[in-house]
């Protein structure tokens, strides 16, 4: 199984994803590590990525997901996956589960201000919210409301996805 933790920059994807993976004994992947240097530089300068920028990155992520599913290697992937088309591209199997970290702009802006050593320019938060297509019911996405501790959020994810004893 692959659990993709998604949302806008600063929502806590990496924090929640790493904690979930650690508790389950699964591998963790950070989608930012799959970006080209050109994409990273654009974001560092506060320039929003276009779909043209994102598709090669999404293709790399899709291939990584396939590699994990083939040997039944459970993993957690932290990824923005802001648009439905991106999520559909990454859903290569029923073994791919999506968890949306939802919070308002003020809450996430506050979390971003506390983050250190990340290339994403905080000025891009508004563009992330503009690009975000919140999941529809037919996408079968678990939505988690932010505003609680990472531990509480991970416990909710494990309970709702029935992951408590899955290793």
Image (cartoon, rainbow, N blue to C red):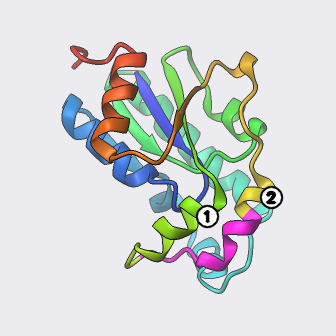
Q: Is residue 140 left or right of residue 34?
A: right
Whether the magenta-drawn stretch holds residue 11 is answered as no
Residue 49 left/right relative to 163:
right
Q: Of residues 41 and 165, which is closer to you in this image?
A: 165
| Looking at the image, residue 32 lies above or below residue 91 | below
Name the residue nearer the viewer: 160 or 85.
Answer: 160
Instruction: Determine whether the residue tagged by mark 2 lies in a helix, strand or loop.
Output: helix
Upstream in sequence: badge 1 or badge 2: 1
Residue 59 position by quadrant: top right
Foreground: 51 or 132? 132
- Callout 1: 10 Å neighbours few (<14), some, many (20+)? few
Checking the image for residue 130, the label placed there is 2
In the image, what residue occupies the spot 76% across and 26% down?
A: 136
* Relative image position of residue 80 (x, y in whole percent): 59, 51
In the image, which residues are magenta? Answer: 118-127
Quarter of the image for residue 90 reads top right
Q: CA distance from mark 1 to mark 2?
A: 14 Å
In this rendering, position of residue 19 left or right of residue 141: left
The residue tagged with tag 1: helix, strand or loop? helix
Residue ID for mark 1? 106
């Amino acid at each position: 199984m692959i659990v993709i933790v998604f949302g806008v920059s600063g929502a806590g994807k990496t924090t929640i994803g790493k904690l979930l993976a650690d508790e389950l004994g699964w591998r963790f992947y950070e989608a930012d590590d799959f970006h080209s240097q050109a994409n990273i530089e654009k974001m560092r300068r506060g320039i929003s990525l276009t779909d043209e920028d994102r598709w090669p990155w999404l293709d790399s992520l899709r291939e990584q997901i396939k590699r994990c599913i083939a040997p039944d290697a459970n993993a957690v992937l932290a990824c923005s996956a802001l648009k439905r088309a991106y999520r559909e591209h990454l859903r290569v199997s029923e073994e791919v589960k999506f968890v949306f970290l939802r919070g308002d702009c003020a809450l996430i802006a506050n979390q971003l201000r506390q983050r250190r050593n990340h290339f994403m320019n905080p000025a891009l938060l508004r563009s992330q919210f503009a690009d975000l297509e919140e999941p529809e019911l037919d996408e079968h996405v678990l939505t988690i409301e932010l505003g609680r501790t990472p531990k509480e959020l991970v416990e909710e994810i494990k309970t709702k996805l029935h992951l408590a004893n899955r290793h």
